[in-house]
Amino acid sequence: MKLLILNLGSSSIKYQLIKKKKILAKGLIERIGMYGSRIKHTFLKEKIIYKNIYNHFIGLKEINNLLCNCVIINTDEIYAIGHRIVHGGFFFIKPTIISENVKKKIKELFNIAPIHNIINTMGIEISEKIFKKSIQVAVFDTEFHSTIPKKAYLYAIPYEFYLKHYIRSYGFHGISHKYVSKKAIQYLKNKKAKLITMHLGNGSSITAVDSGVSVETSMGFSPNSGLIMGTRSGDIDSNIIFNTLKKGFKIDELIDILNKKSGMLAISGYSDMRDIKKRYDKGDKKAILAYEMYSYRVKKYIGISISVMNGVDALIFTGGIGENDMLMRKLICENLDFFGIKLDNKKNNNLLKKNNVNEIQVKNNKVKILVIKTNEELQISKEILNVLNVKNVKK
């Protein structure tokens, strides 16, 4: 049984073709809609294809062509397509086989996740045209956070907003947080471990995981809350919005600004941390400020997570920034000695690439600092097998 996993982000597409937990082919299209877009495709060995990928539609067509040229004869070989869907809202708290009604419900959440759910739905609809015989399955980023207690997910606004309009904190990046927290629990051999998982990338979030369960997370009603991100503002005072509206801005204009023109882009002029790092190394003051602001906000949420769990056994860095940016990891871990968090700079600067889990804390430190490579696609494949009840599937 071959499963194709599609993970569409705001500027990227990750994909894996999996059979019996073995990855047959995989790849990443990055910087979609930006200068320097490229495809990293791996079948036997990795090759990099530099190509203008103007949108996700073009990206998905390229993925189909690459797979047909190397590992499948035709699309009928793919039994199921797994889609990472950012927002499940009140409707979905577990993986779901996609139907017209499911697509309708996902579309009803467009106003909450205006970037991602639209992109995710497009991925579903294109896949239905390309892979006509494949079962389409939705796996939701919000599912892992369904365990957050009511005292944490409610907002202090009239209760009818929650009852009538489903306004509450949902949390996101749940597939990644779930994967790395399970990896950490296995590595630490401690089912009751108190973990702070930090998924840091173009979109960023922190989750407090107590005994394998999400109890608090930085993202809330939408993915545009919590940490500073590539183009998203993260937390802001709500009155900023009202004040700006009074000055003549339109609602759609503000949505566009807060989701696509804010965050690191607004601070430094760049949304990709790799570009900002190059400017940082040259002493660019805006790039330095961007690093300082980003790391400060992460540090702030680490403190929140520790207080919620009354302690911490391990910090976990994951995601594009978390796994690859040694400077950002250093800045985040600075001045956290009070909590027993002490980084070993040598280990931080020299990760063993072959290791799925790297320890970067000082020797004999009580609190572990781990860098774990996330694999949302593998986690999605596990969820698909569960929802399809794979034991009863003969194909």
Image (tube, rainbow, N blue to C red):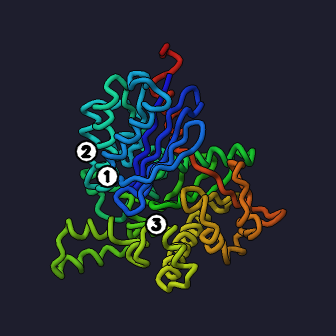
Q: Which mark is residue 272?
A: 3
Seen in the picture, residue 54 relative to 226 is either above or below; the reply is above
Disc 1: which residue: 55
Cα gap from disc 2 to disc 1, whole angstroms:
19 Å
Mark 3–mark 2 contact, CB under 8 Å? Answer: no
Check disc 2 and report its element: helix, strand or loop.
Answer: helix
Three-letter amino acid code of the residue under disc 1: Asn
Q: Quadrant of residue 197?
A: bottom right
Q: Position of residue 325 (x, y in %)?
A: 60, 65
Left or right of residue 267, residue 176 in this image? right
Q: Earlier in the sequence, mark 2 or mark 1?
A: 1
Q: Which amino acid does the dot numbered 3 rest on?
A: Asp
How many labels sit on residues?
Answer: 3
Q: CA gap, disc 3 to disc 2?
A: 28 Å
Labels 2 and 1 touching (C-beta < 8 A): no
Q: Which residue is disc 2 drawn over?
A: 107
Q: Nearer the viewer, residue 174 or 307?
A: 174
User: Which of the pair 253/69 is nearer the observer?
Assistant: 69
Q: Would residue 93 be visible to someone looking at this image?
A: no
Q: Amino acid at mark 2?
A: Lys
Label 1: element kind: loop
- Which tag, 3 or 1, sits closer to the chain's start? 1
- From what the image shows, is residue 137 above or below residue 49? above
Foreground label between 3 and 2: 3
Indicate whether 308 appears above or below 240: above
Q: Is residue 176 left or right of residue 370?
A: left
